């Protein structure tokens, strides 16, 4: 078996040249005014508390894509400020996924935890500047005194503590003298601000938990809203791109950066990073939050984060999606401010488009029905020629064996067919793809009345190049030669959720109970033409059945497992055509 064709070529500049969106416009303007220096710098900042999903792919393509397109840089930074939910397993999986998508952070792999020391020092400076204080209200009390959209909050009784006392208490928090939740460091901003995020937000909390990188070095951890802008500044990020839910946090992002003179940054920056928000990706028939995906994994409603039905990058990869198709999808959905729901049919359309020209065609019979061609010589095997891909003649031709016993698809025969059934029926004819026309002479059944075999005759003149090759019959069926075919297990997938917007139903149901019970159908009886072992990559099209991915195979020809990525029915194209009519 050849090396799997994953981790395919990196996206080149050309490929993303078409990328124009409102963020690119901002970048253009900043570059032309030289606001951000000569080159832009972005980052992708995942929290390592789960596997990446297709929504993250949108953010990855955007951040790395902007850097590529504008000859800038993009960092990978783990936002690992919450040790209780984070694990090394997730860090490794995230790196693998970003690379597989075709992007490189070169030597710029960072962790927010790298900055714990600097973030602490900066907090000390904030205290000295009178801009932060140690507060002893409980989390509940802080919530209760925060006010509402219409009413201002109340100032903490600890707000007026002196600098010296604050410094001492903060130091003691760090030394581990206090229990979780007993104290926090808060910014001193404005309890009457119309923006609730500015009402003395918490900057640091006490958490006696081991961190996957810093171990037990720390028992106080910075909050996201504090660590994030500073991490951006430390790395020289120019455009800090995030999803819309952070829009209301932007004033706090800016406050943190402006709270001390710029010279205070370890790295002298001539500009401050700017936060820009875009709409997150929502996909039909899918849930996208890590918390819910995690629930599915933990409750064993799926086989793991990389279950081929999951919207995770690793699930899509195992299903057979290619990086090109995912990048194409992210390009097509575009970047905007308005939240919307994208039809999963578009994602499926992208993989079909990608594989149409590149995937070899293979004959595979998923549910076999045996046919004996009674007038065909007993021991003859003919090697007939067929094209590898009618959409791409460059892919050449191959030989397929034909013999007296073959299989066709059970559903390609009907004993009492309705009017428009053009496949095989008693006394009827059908063309076997790239082979002969056969006629059904007799139907054999077992004692239960189930069909076990069809006895057919063939027309020796009807093969390609033969005197009757042009003879027309209504239907063509795919088939495999019984003695040569390889056994395989084939997995057919449906959407993980039947509901178009499962999130909308979650108020009344558990996420695992919403799962489509028929989302996985395993077929163990499939028979595949032997040529499948010579195919170059792992992707192929089973004629009339869809695009498939060879997920695994043992050393022998047995043990083949194929995932169906998508069927051939392109509901996206169809919908587009009817719109443009
Ligand atoms: P989730 O809500 O799924 O748990 P998250 O936002 O907590 O995701 P992070 O690890 O913090 O996950 O995300 C890393 C980056 O990916 C962030 O910049 C975030 O805005 C972006 N991102 C997350 N989900 C989506 C999405 N559905 N569409 C676009 N970008 C996303
Ligand atoms: Mg997050």
Image: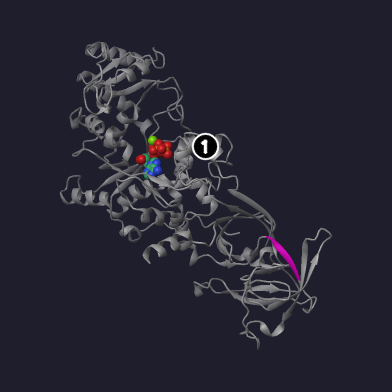
Residue lying at the far right of the rendered structure: 447
Q: Nearer the viewer, residue 563 or 77?
A: 563
Q: Nearer the viewer, residue 477 or 318?
A: 477
Q: Is residue 126 left or right of residue 305?
A: left
Q: Answer above or below: position of 470 versus 180.
A: below
Q: Is residue 290 left or right of residue 493?
A: left
Q: Please identify the quadrant where the C terminus is shown.
A: bottom left
Q: Answer above or below: position of 504 versus 412.
A: above
Q: Quadrant of ligand 1?
A: top left
Instruction: Measuring from the top left, give residue 146's x and y in whole percent.
Output: 29, 21
Q: Residue at x 46, y 62 (%)?
A: 354
Residue lying at the far front of the rendered structure: 419
Q: Residue at x 31, y 16 (%)?
A: 170
Q: Answer above or below: position of 350 versus 227.
A: below
Q: Please identify the quadrant where the N terminus is shown.
A: bottom right
What's the magenta region?
Answer: 367-371
Instruction: Measuring from the top left, give residue 351's x and y in whole percent.
Output: 47, 58
Q: Name the image quarter holding residue 111.
A: top left
Query: Which residue is identified by label 1?
Result: 511
Residue lying at the far left of the rendered structure: 33
Q: Name the image quarter holding residue 171.
A: top left
Other-residue count near label 1 (Cα within 10 Å), few / some / many at <14 / 14–19 / ≥20:
many
Q: Residue at x 33, y 37 (%)?
A: 245
Instruction: Measuring from the top left, give residue 511's x and y in whole percent.
Output: 52, 37
Whether residue 216 can be seen here: yes
Residue 444 within the magenta-colored segment of the rendering: no
Count of numbered circles in the view: 1
Residue 369 within the magenta-colored segment of the rendering: yes
């Amino acid at each position: 078996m050849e090396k799997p064709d994953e981790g395919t070529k990196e996206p080149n500049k050309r490929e993303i040249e078409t990328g124009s969106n409102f963020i690119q416009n901002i970048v253009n303007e900043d570059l032309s005014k030289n606001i951000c220096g000569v080159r832009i710098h972005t980052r992708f900042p995942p929290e390592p508390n789960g596997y990446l999903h297709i929504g993250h792919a949108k953010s990855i393509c955007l951040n790395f894509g902007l850097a590529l397109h504008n000859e800038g840089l993009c960092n990978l930074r783990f936002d690992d400020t919450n040790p209780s939910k984070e694990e090394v397993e997730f860090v490794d999986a995230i790196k693998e996924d970003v690379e597989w998508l075709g992007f490189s952070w070169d030597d710029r792999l960072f962790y927010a935890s790298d900055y714990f020391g600097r973030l602490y020092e900066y907090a000390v400076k904030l205290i000295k500047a009178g801009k932060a204080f140690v507060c002893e209200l409980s989390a509940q009390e802080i919530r209760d005194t925060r006010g509402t959209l219409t009413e201002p909050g109340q100032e903490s009784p600890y707000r007026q503590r002196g600098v010296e006392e604050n410094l001492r208490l903060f130091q003691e928090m760090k030394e581990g003298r206090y229990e979780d939740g007993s104290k926090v460091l808060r910014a001193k901003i404005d309890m009457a601000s119309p923006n609730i995020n500015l009402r003395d937000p918490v900057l640091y909390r006490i958490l006696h938990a081991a961190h996957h990188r810093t171990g037990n070095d720390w028992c106080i951890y910075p909050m996201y809203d504090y660590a994030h802008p500073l991490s951006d500044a430390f790395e020289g990020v120019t455009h800090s791109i995030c999803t819309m839910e952070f829009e209301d946090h932007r004033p706090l992002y800016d406050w943190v950066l402006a709270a001390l003179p710029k010279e205070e940054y370890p790295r002298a920056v001539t500009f401050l990073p700017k936060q820009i928000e875009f709409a997150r990706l929502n996909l039909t028939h899918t849930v996208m939050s890590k918390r819910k995906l995690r629930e599915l994994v933990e409750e064993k409603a799926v086989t793991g984060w990389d279950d081929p039905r999951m919207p995770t990058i690793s699930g899509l990869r195992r299903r057979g999606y290619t990086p090109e198709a995912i990048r194409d999808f992210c390009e097509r959905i575009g970047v905007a401010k308005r939240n919307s729901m994208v039809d999963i049919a578009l994602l499926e359309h992208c993989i079909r488009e990608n594989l149409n020209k590149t995937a070899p065609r293979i004959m595979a019979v998923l549910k076999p029905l045996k046919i004996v061609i009674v007038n065909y010589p007993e021991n003859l095997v003919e090697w007939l020629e067929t094209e590898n891909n009618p959409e791409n003649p460059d892919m050449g031709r191959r030989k397929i064996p034909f013999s007296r016993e073959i299989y066709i698809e059970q559903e390609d025969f009907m004993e009492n067919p309705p009017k428009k059934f053009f496949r095989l029926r008693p006394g009827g004819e059908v063309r076997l793809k790239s082979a002969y026309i056969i006629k059904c002479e007799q139907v054999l059944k077992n004692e239960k009345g189930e069909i076990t075999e069809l006895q057919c005759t063939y027309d020796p003149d009807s093969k390609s190049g033969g005197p009757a090759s042009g003879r027309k019959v209504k239907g063509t069926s795919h088939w495999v030669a019984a003695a040569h075919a390889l056994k395989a297990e084939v997995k057919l997938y449906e959407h993980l959720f039947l509901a178009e917007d499962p999130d909308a139903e979650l108020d009344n149901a558990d996420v695992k109970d919403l799962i489509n019970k028929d989302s996985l159908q395993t077929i163990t009886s499939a028979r595949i033409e032997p040529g499948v072992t010579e195919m170059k990559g792992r992707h192929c099209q089973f004629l009339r059945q869809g695009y498939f991915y060879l997920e695994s195979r043992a050393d022998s020809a047995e043990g083949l497992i194929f995932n169906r990525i998508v069927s051939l029915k392109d509901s996206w194209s169809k919908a587009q055509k009817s719109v443009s009519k």
